[in-house]
Amino acid sequence: MLQASPILNTKLLPPSISDIIHRERLTPLLSQCKQKQLIIVTAGAGYGKTTLIAHAIHELDLQTVWYRLDRSDEDFITFLHYLATGVNKIYPKFGVEILSILGDPRGSHRKHEALLTLFINDLESLPNEDLYLVLDDYQSIGDSQEINNALTFLLKHLPDRIHLILISRKGIDLPLSRLRAMRKVLDISWGDLLFSPSEIKQLFTEIFDLAIPEAHIEIIFEKTKGWISGLILLSHMLKRRSEEEKGNLLAGLRGSMEEFYRYLDENVFQPLTPHEKEFLVKTSILSKLTPDLCNGLLNITDSGEILKQLQANHLFTFSLEGENEGYIYHDLFRDFLRTKLVAETDGKECRKIHETAADLYEKNREYRLALDHYLKAERMEDASRLISMFARMWIKQGQVLRIRFYLEQLPAHYVQQDPWISYLQAGLMELSGRLQEAATGYARSLEIFQTQPSDAGIDICLADLATCYYTIGDYEKCEFLYKELLSRNTPPSSLKFACLGYLISLSYALGKTSNSDWFMEKARSMLPEIIKEEYGREMHGWLNISIGRRFIIAGDFKQALEILKQALEILEPTGQYQMLVYCHLLLSEIYYNLGLFKKGLDAAKTLLTIAQEKGLNDGTFFPGGLLLLACNYLGMGRKEEALSHARRSLARFQEIGMFETQVLAHKVLFSIYFDSGDLLAAEEHVRLGMKAIRDIRLPLYQSMLEICLASIMIEKGECDKAMRLLKTAETRSPHGKYHQAMIFLEYSRCYLKRDQINQAIKTIRQGLSMCEANGYDYLLVKQKGWIVSLLVMFFSRNEKKDYIHKILSLIGSEAVAELSGILTNSPTPPVRKAAIDLFNSLRQESSPGLKIRFFGKFRVFIGEKELPIETWQSKKALNLFKFLVLYRSRGYINKEMIMEFLWPGEDPQKSANRFHVALNFLRKALEPNLVKGIASSYILSNGGAYKLTMGDQGWVDIEEFSQELKNAKKEKSPEESIHHYLKALDLYEGDFLEEDLYTDWCNDVRERYKENYLSALTEVIRYYEMQKEFQKCIDYAEAYLKTDKYAEEIYRVLMRCHSYLGRRAMVAKTFNKCKENIVTDLNCPLSSETIELSNQLGLQ
């Protein structure tokens, strides 16, 4: 088995920190590193970013993992592998499991979040000490979305004692607003790194051993602006010059990069010996320098001495800490040397140097570096050989960017003539969603393999070409190729097994159900032996996926659900991401058809997340995920979101050339427009779907579109056309139970439209039986616009009463409204009785809970829908409702007590009349469809007393608030109490009934809740100050002062917290605000405690 790319230890070595001055000016800034979770150092090349952080780590004695990045680290698995290895070097027991996974090529298939979670959990188990993860040269990977996603996840979940330092030449594109709001980010920019005049003098004196007059220091600062690389270069220029020569040189300095290179050439490079010059220019092609590597490259023996001398003379050469023989050149110096190499060396010699480097790297098994140099040496056969060795593994690991980069370096004739390179390019096209190009590429590779001949190549190309047609939706071509492959003797059993999986589902889709059965039994018989093979677990999961899809096509959704859940369990440990994505896609489809939209949405989002992490946004899975988002959003009634995602998926499917999925996208768009009443747009999408598959045979999809078109015809009143379409669809897909159930329902609707009630009842009986047997409840719910009246008729005949009740319960309030309409239209006695029974039963079940907010503005929600203010046509009705909510714990309240509350001291007879009017308005506000003579679901009466019931999952914020405070006081530890206090504070969105400011009965209640709120705030402030979480303490203290600006003890808390955080200006500002509010406003002296604290903090 191929192993994952080896770890280069030099990338995990921090730079050495010799010859550094102590910059007192930066001490306060750098000391903040210990309080911040994220430190970002951003500046261009040559500003001393790396040196600054290395020096800070040394001075502050920080435990550090140093990771020097390059382009190869854009791959998530590579990135995390290095990071975990770095931590393991400090803590040898760290990450045994994750390092094992990351070292195995199959580990790349694991979900990124799962691997990151494992990494974070291992960090949690480390000794209780701070650890700093330094990512140097972050700009090398800053454009990688999967790395940015990984860092976003890490920053959200890292333990507080784990810090991250990013060193970059350009800005960091990460969502940091939360961390910045919590003041956990320290930004160090180029301005902070520039040397001041006094630091320049210190540098030249202590490090460069150059005495520079003050006047010249000012000129140096003006010319270089304190840029350290310019200062180092200038030190070489000023050596061995008189004061007059120094002055003349400084006067002529200019500042462009071109000038920098010229000065570097004249003052650093030219004074060197020819041997040193040759060494520098030729070794500049190496990303790291070791004596052995340099000796081998140049065929010399003194590389070690040269490297030591370069570093000692400050010639932009730095040793790597922990490895005496490892060095790197400064980026600017390396770029300068490479420019010299190109300018002063002919192409042949330059290629020869790269060729030697490539041979050396390959001998050391550093294949990626070898490949880079083979390409630069134009040794394409060797480059092609290495790509052939590793690119298939890279594609399996999802390293699309890497394989694309290397293929682009090869001349076109290699891709056309080398069958494996041609095959890999076709694979890349498939991963990128360019299916027609992929099919052409596989076919070309197949032809080349057949001329050699290569059985292994022929087998793989046949399989992948067939799979390509499967994805496109051309099942007949796919079937032909898979059968040809199965007829050959050469394919390994695992490849034949995979082919059988495809044939199981596509044969069923083509209506060849007996063939599908045979393929399924054949695969099951092979499974015991297949499981024993290296990728046996993956193959087992694939069989479950294939059988699951066959059951979906058959309409056996519950059976498919169980087998796909098993597939997930089997595949999760392997992390085979393409199979996992496909599994989630099928699960989302099942959940949609079963009406479990939240689960369907979650599955679709999961597959999209994996696709994005693996760089598959251009592939086939991403638009499939968008389409399933659309389906499930549609099921949830969120049509705008459904429409947006469906359109995006259709555009992508058309671009890719996937016929089958284009049909599905058109079907979803049909449903959106049909439900919205736009029959013209709905019909257009049906006919476009038919056009998409007119040249291929997909009977189930053709049947589905004919059913959709029949629905439109029924809506238009063209029932004869609808009947013909339904009969055609019925004969086209006899093996699709879901489609058959749809056909029976459309027959029923057509008969109902014609007033042929007995025929409608007959066909609805068949449709109901199929739906009940197969769990197609949501299919019936989707018919809610017409089916309720027919179900009531059926219910009145005492048939399937439980199932009808279940379906109407799922339809919910719309069914209740429809039943209300049936009762209003005076139906026949049996139907009326059925409607009343269903109405009374459903109304109680379907009454959504009341959610009521007293804190802040008074708001009422029924379920998730807020009642607008205009709903309350009577202010007395609104006050009656507030009273019933506020005192509902008392149970039934006598009418006279309510009347006295609303109309104190008034005539009881008049108050009684007014009460019943207000009560009627209240009922209508809560239940606008309430039928006369039917009791309210929320307002209950008993004799002359009334009470409010909240419905399913109803709640009142003031009750929840009080309960959380009680829970907090019951807890034994502060850590357990704080959770409840915080929940209580979240509920307090403002003072009790703030719009009723001058209503007498509210005042006492308002003050009581405000006191409880401030008491809870006090507990939270005390807790966070004790925990030394000073910023949180400050946030809650400021919230307290917004309610009570005279709370002197809270000002003292703020002063202490700002002092702990080193914010002297904020300490003074807080103290002055305290004096202003208490001394000036209240004309009271400050307490002795406040005066004493201000003295301690140096304010007096």
Image (cartoon, rainbow, N blue to C red):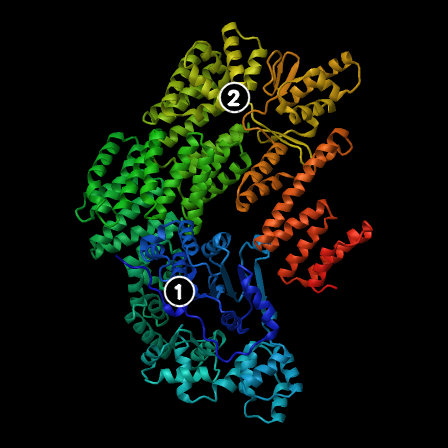
Quadrant containing the N terminus is bottom left
- Residue located at (32% from left, 78% from top): 292
Return the x and y of residue 980 as percentages of the image width and height: 56, 41
Q: Is residue 46 left or right of residue 379?
A: right
Looking at the picture, tell me which residue is in the foreground, 630 or 1039. Answer: 1039
Which residue is nearer to you in this view: 884 or 824? Answer: 884
Pinpoint residue 303: horizontal percent, then vertical percent: 36, 83
Q: Position of residue 1067 (x, y in %)?
A: 69, 60
Tally of marks: 2
Q: Quadrant of the C terminus?
A: bottom right
**Circle 1 — which element?**
helix
Q: Which mark is residue 845?
A: 2
Image-based side of 459 in relation to 304, left or right? left
Q: Taking 457 as reference, is 39 left or right?
A: right
Residue nearer the viewer, 1001 or 367? 1001
Task: Give the secondary structure at mark 2.
Answer: helix
**Could you classify mark 1 by the number of other residues whose Cα lies within 10 Å: few (under 14), some (14-19), or many (20 or more)?**
few
The answer, for residue 409, to whether it is visible in the render is yes
Comes first in the chain, label 2 or label 1: 1
Q: Measure how far apart labels 2 and 1 are at the Cα level.
A: 61 Å
Would you say residue 815 is visible in this rendering? no
Q: Amino acid at mark 1?
A: Ile
Q: Which residue is mark 1?
A: 90
The three-letter code of the residue at mark 2 reads Glu
301 up-or-down from 381: above or below: below
